Amino acid sequence: MEQINLGEMVIDVVLKDIKNVHLSVYPPSGKVRIAAPLRMNLDTIRIYAISKLAWIKKQQQKFQDQVREAPREYLYKEGHYFLGKRYMLKIVEQDAPPYVVIKHTNIELHIRPDTDTQKRQSIMDEWYRQQLKELAPPIIEKWEKLMEVSINELAVKKMKTKWGTCNREARRIWLNLELAKKPIHCIEYIIVHELAHLLERTHNAKFVAYMDNYLPEWKHLKNELNQLPVSHVE
């Protein structure tokens, strides 16, 4: 992967077997990436990036202005989100296998005594992963029928720059673990977005038309999702 520098801005450049240039600015840090045709040289790409500099900085500013959560320590009465609702964390120490359960306004984290912060996070992450794996399939099945597409696999993982990805060849969708903390309609928006990539690879006019057709309020949902607090990133 190549890189170009515009002052203090570093832009990753990937040369691919594609026809057009694609510019992306990714949350949460505002990382910039340009995918360009194999035949295009770096000087031409640099000129293109300079022409888009104002737009790039505008997108980066949006991410900088986004509310961020403080680093989680997984302590008693700490706030944690699930499906857009804030819960207070309750720590229950017991000499038994760990588990997580929601009770009223609390998320109870049952752990063995002396469980350290890293292990507490791992237990919570696994709980979020399982919740998302249970919530997503019915939504996917609904939209597979409406959009006349299908996937072979759903997976969940931590991602720093994307809410989801779609591998068209493998017909596999990855969802960001953080989505389990967001409202269910935001999760549905990301699922529709990734399924639409089975119909159109890039975010071109055709892709936008698909989104407008299947989920007319998608732009509103996108804005809502991107305005919600995001997790602390080292």
Image: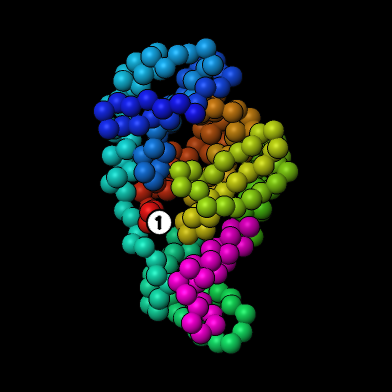
List x then y, in percent, for residue 31.
39, 37
Residue closest to the eye, 123 or 151 = 123
Query: Which residue is denoted by mark 1 in the rendering?
Result: 231
Residue closest to the eye, 35 or 61 = 35
How many neighbours does mark 1 have within 10 angstroms: few (below 14), some (14-19), or many (20 or more)? some
The structure residue drawn at horizontal position 56% and vertical position 30%, both measured from the top left corner, is 210
Q: Is residue 203 visible?
A: yes
Residue 109 lies in the magenta stretch = yes
The image quadrant where one finds the C terminus is bottom left
Q: What stretch of residues is rendered in magenta?
A: 106-133
The structure residue drawn at horizontal position 42% and vertical position 67%, both measured from the top left corner, is 80
List x then y, in percent, for residue 114.
48, 82
List x then y, in percent, for residue 128.
55, 63
> What secondary structure predominates along the stretch shown in magenta?
helix
Residue 41 lies in the magenta stretch = no
Residue at the extreme front: 2
List x then y, in percent, for residue 178.
49, 55
The structure residue drawn at horizontal position 64% and vertical position 50%, both measured from the top left corner, is 155
Disc 1 marks which amino acid? Ser
Up-down: is 106 above or below 218?
Answer: below
Which color scheme does this rendered protein use? rainbow
Left or right for 173, reference 158: right
Q: Is residue 105 visible?
A: no
The structure residue drawn at horizontal position 55% and vertical position 87%, both measured from the top left corner, is 94
Q: Please, what secondary structure does the residue beneath circle 1 have? A: loop
Residue closest to the eye, 144 or 62 = 62
